[in-house]
Image (cartoon, rainbow, N blue to C red):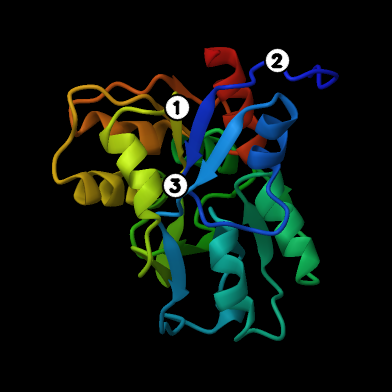
Amino acid sequence: MKTDNLLLKGKTVITTHPAKERDELVDVLKQYGIRVLQMPLIETVPCSFSLPKPLSFYDWVVFTSKNALQPFFAKQSHCAAQIAVIGNSTSHALTALGWKADFVGSGKSGGHFSRELRQVLHPNDKVLLVLGKLAPAVLTNNLTKFCQVERINVYDTKMPSVIDESVLELIKSDAYDLITVTSPSAVHHLIQLLGEAPKEMRLVSIGEITSAAIRRYGIEPVATASTQTYREVACSVLNCF
């Protein structure tokens, strides 16, 4: 990417993912002079859970989001099962907790991840899916045809208690260029805040599941990232411009 000048100065992009200290999506866009306004629309919170069986029972433990890592491993001091994660960002977060992934998917989508997993799983392998409460059943349904699958939900997603009303007003008055959304929950919360789905919204999605959530409101995403990473969302935004 060229970053030697402010190519897109004057453009406004609104992000809706939780704010964090190091944010690749925001950093990349700002390098191009884009005005980035952050309005987090999701907040993840751990939820109580218990394992269906002892962890030693499973051959694989599978994660589709880094949000599931901390709640799960906070209760586990040992894991003999192999660990699979959906993409590099989740793999890096796992490493930061002191664990290592045995398989890292491409991060394209849950459906694609299930097809990748079938290349490394054996028939009748015992698999534990560690997910968020609102995660769709795509992975469960696809893998159940091939091996033994159980699911636990270790975190939930809710609307933040405080929303930046000034940024929300920009959306209502159509005074923005693009909005990035990185989960179906962010989409639902945005429409909830607006009261109804506008006829036109310029949304850039992190993946096909999030894009499907957008389409349920009769809106076609402007772009969908090729892989579920913040960097690819940033690239999708730049490609739109």
The answer, for residue 138, to whether it is visible in the render is: no
Distance in Å between CA atoms under marks 2 and 3? 49 Å
Residue placed under numbered mark 3 in the picture: 146
Give the residue type at disc 1: Leu
- Identify which residue, 81 or 122, lies in the foreground: 81
Residue at coordinates 71% horizontally, 86% vertically from top-left? 77
| Mark 1 crowdedness (10 Å alpha carbons): few <14, some 14-19, many ≥20 | many
- Which one is earlier in the sequence, the residue at label 1 or at label 2? 2
Give SS at disc 1.
Answer: strand
User: Residue 7 got which mark?
Assistant: 2
Q: Position of residue 17 (x, y in %)?
A: 50, 50
- Identify which residue, 160 or 103, lies in the foreground: 160
Give the residue type at disc 2: Leu
Determine whether 81 is above or below 135 in the image. Answer: below
Q: Position of residue 119 (x, y in %)?
A: 61, 38
The answer, for residue 165, to whether it is visible in the render is: yes
